[in-house]
Image: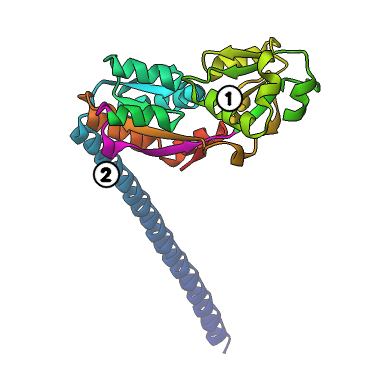
Amino acid sequence: MKRFKKAVIVGGVLLALTSVYGCGANNDKNDSANTENKVETSTDKEKEESQKDEKDEEEKEEKKLDPEITVSAAASLRESFTEIAENFEKEYGTKVNLNFGSSGALQKQIEEGAPSDYFVSAGQKQMKALEEASLVDSDSVKDFLGNKLVLAVPKDSDEIKTVEDLEGTDGKIAIAEIDSVPVGQYTKEALDNLNIWDKIEDKIVFAKDVKATTAYIEQGEAVAGFIYKSDAIAAPGVDIAEEIDESTHKPITYPEGIVTASEKKETVKEFSEFLKTDESKAILEKYGFEVK
C-alpha cells in the first residue's frame, strides 16, 4: 500500500513537471512566432517606405526639371516666397531666382524682355496687360491668392486708431504710388469712396512699393499708412490700427501666369503646383494671405 502511494505521488510530480515544461515550450514557440511576425511586419513596412522613396526619386528623375527658374513676384510676397523657394530647392534641386518689386515695375520688365519665367502680380491690371500683349500664356492665368488692405501705424502708437483720425493729424501718411502699384490703387479707391482722399491729400508721402510704404511707417517717418495685411504681419515694428472695409475697393487678388517666352515651362508648372501644397499654404497663411 505504501509503495502504491509513493508511485502515485511520483507519477503526479512527473506529470506536473511535464505539464510545466510543455507549457514553457509552447510559450517559447509562441514568443518566437510573435517575434518573427514583428520582424516580418517591420521589414515589410521598411520595404514599403523604401519603395515609395525610390518611386518619388524616379518621378523626379522622369520630370527632368531645369536647374533654375526666375520668378517675378509682387513685393508683398517677399517673406512667404523666400521660404517656399528654399523648400522647393531642397525638394527638387531647382534654384528659384526671386525678383521682387511693384507689380507695375515687374510688368514693365517683362514687356522689355527681362528674364522671367513666372509672374505673380498683386493686381489684375498688370497681368491683364501682359496677357493682352501675349506675353503670358492665357491658359496659365488664374487667381492664386487674396489679401486685405489695412491702416497701419508704428508699433505701440495710439495717435491714429481709425481712418477718420487721419483728418486731424499733422503727420505724414504713407501710401504706395497710385499709378503703378496695386496697393496704392486699392488705397486711392477706398479713400475716395470714404470721402477722405481730398481731405488728406496734402499729407501723403508716396512710396515706390508696399515694402517702402511699410518702412516709412515702421521707422516713424509717417504716423500711419496703408499696406497689405501680410506686410503688417511680417513687419515687427508695425501695428494694424484698422482693416479697411472690403466693399470700398476692388477685391485684392493675386493672379499667376507663365511668361510666354519662358523655355522652362514644365519646371514652372511644378513650382506653381508646389505653391498649392499643404506645406506652402501654411506658410502663405502664416503671413496673412488667403489661399484660393
Return the x and y of residue 98 as percentages of the image width and height: 39, 19
Residue located 66% across and 18% down the image: 201
Quadrant position of residue 186: top right
Residue 34 in view: yes
Q: Which residue is mark 2?
A: 51
Relative to 270, 287 lies left or right:
right
Could you give the CA–CA distance between mark 1 and mark 2, rounded to whole angstroms? 43 Å
Up-down relation of residue 72 to residue 23 (above or below): above
The segment highlighted magenta reads: 133-148
Quadrant position of residue 3: bottom right
Q: Mark 1 or mark 2: which comes first in sequence?
A: 2
Q: Is residue 141 magenta?
A: yes
Return the x and y of residue 8 as percentages of the image width and height: 53, 83
Q: Which mark is residue 231?
A: 1
Residue 99 in view: no
| Colour scheme | rainbow
Q: Residues within 10 Å of mark 1 (few under 14, many from 20)?
A: many
